[in-house]
Amino acid sequence: MVEKKTPLSKIKGMGEKKIAEMEKAGVASAEDLVKADPKKLAEKVSGSEEAMGKFQEKAGEIVKKEGEKDGKGEKGKSEGKKGDKKEKEKDIKEEVDSEDNGGEKSGEKVKGEKGGESKEEEKKDSGEVKEKGKEKGEKKKEVSHPRKNKAVVNGRNLKISTKHSIAICKYIKGKNIEEAIEDLGKVIKKREAIPMRGKIGHKKGMESGRYPVNASKEIVRLLNQLISNSDVNGIGIPYIYSASANKASRPYRRFGSEKMKRSHVHIESKERGKE
């Protein structure tokens, strides 16, 4: 028997762009996604390891449901075959009895007519039930949920400087998400600096700036999550509508000498031209 493969389009939140990336990575069905390693997928496909894990959970649920349906269909076929054999045995017995007793034929005809009438009535009732079910299904299909016009991503208690994260949020605000990821990649490679206030050394093309590598890496990870959230919400060309950073609760280091750096980051994206 050839195994039926469930298409990736049945997984909620899986857009056309994401499906194309999955197929390039060698994941062509929900069964392949369940078997895949989320870490390796996150390297090949745009998205975090957490997002790949969620997609795997959804794929697992769909594969289970499909398996249960196939199992029920096979049981129904086997029961149908057994019923056909029993009906054939009954017909043979009735023929033998009719040959022995000719008077019983008329009784059987009457029973057959009554049985035919009852079957017709059952068919009519089942037809009416099906029509009512179709009407209810059409009414349910007419209900449409409001489309979300923005996507959100939150980073809680990140191990980065609040000062650096505020400067990066100002730097990426208003840009396309992919463009912001490219610019932060240059910052990580120390080819481009982030403008900052204060008594800081001058950098090329600006008064003062720095290369916040750790903060840039964390925000790039959040931006990759924001891309997948935008795909789920159906946002065509997303751009960074809002980006902000705040101080988080800062735990003490060992022996209570000083506090660690902790920050909260909140980023929103919208479709350009549809605000």
Image (cartoon, rainbow, N blue to C red):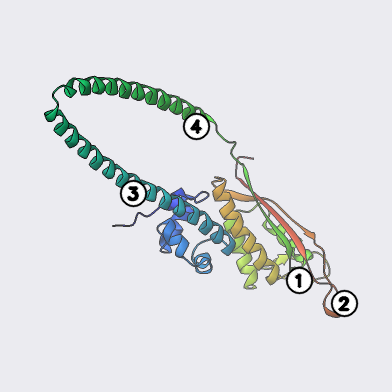
Q: Residues within 10 Å of mark 3 (few under 14, many from 20)?
A: few
Numbered disc in front, either 4 or 1: 4
The three-letter amino acid code for the residue at tag 4 is Lys
Percent across and percent down for residue 256 are 87, 77
Question: Sequence-wise, which precedes: disc 1 or disc 3?
Answer: 3
Q: Amino acid at mark 3?
A: Glu
Q: Please tell me whether mark 3 or mark 4 is closer to you in this view.
A: 3
Q: Specify few, some or many for label 4: CA neighbours under 10 Å numbering under 14, 14-19, or 20 or more.
A: few
Label 3 or label 4, whichever comes before in sequence order = 3
Q: Say whether disc 4 or disc 1 marks the residue closer to the N-terminus.
A: 4
What kind of residue is marked 1? His
* Residue in front for this viewpoint, 235 or 66: 66
The residue under the point 82% across, 76% down is 253
Looking at the rendered structure, the secondary structure element under dot 3 is helix
What numbered label is drawn on residue 74?
A: 3
Q: Which residue is mark 1?
A: 202
Residue 245 occupies quadrant: bottom right
Name the residue rendered at 33%, 57% in the picture: 3
Which sits in the foreground, 184 or 158?
158
User: Which x, y percent locates residue 151?
Assistant: 63, 48
Q: Which mark is residue 141?
A: 4
* Farthest-out residue, left: 99
Q: Quadrant of residue 19?
A: bottom left
Q: Position of residue 50 (x, y in %)?
A: 59, 62
x and y percentages locating residue 142 in the rendered image: 51, 29
Separation of residues labelled 2 and 3 (CA atoms):
67 Å
Q: Nearer the viewer, mark 2 or mark 3?
A: 3
Question: Does the residue at mark 4 contact the one at mark 1 (Cβ under 8 Å)?
Answer: no
Q: Which residue is mark 2?
A: 256
Identify the residue at horizontal 17%, vertical 36% (top origin): 92
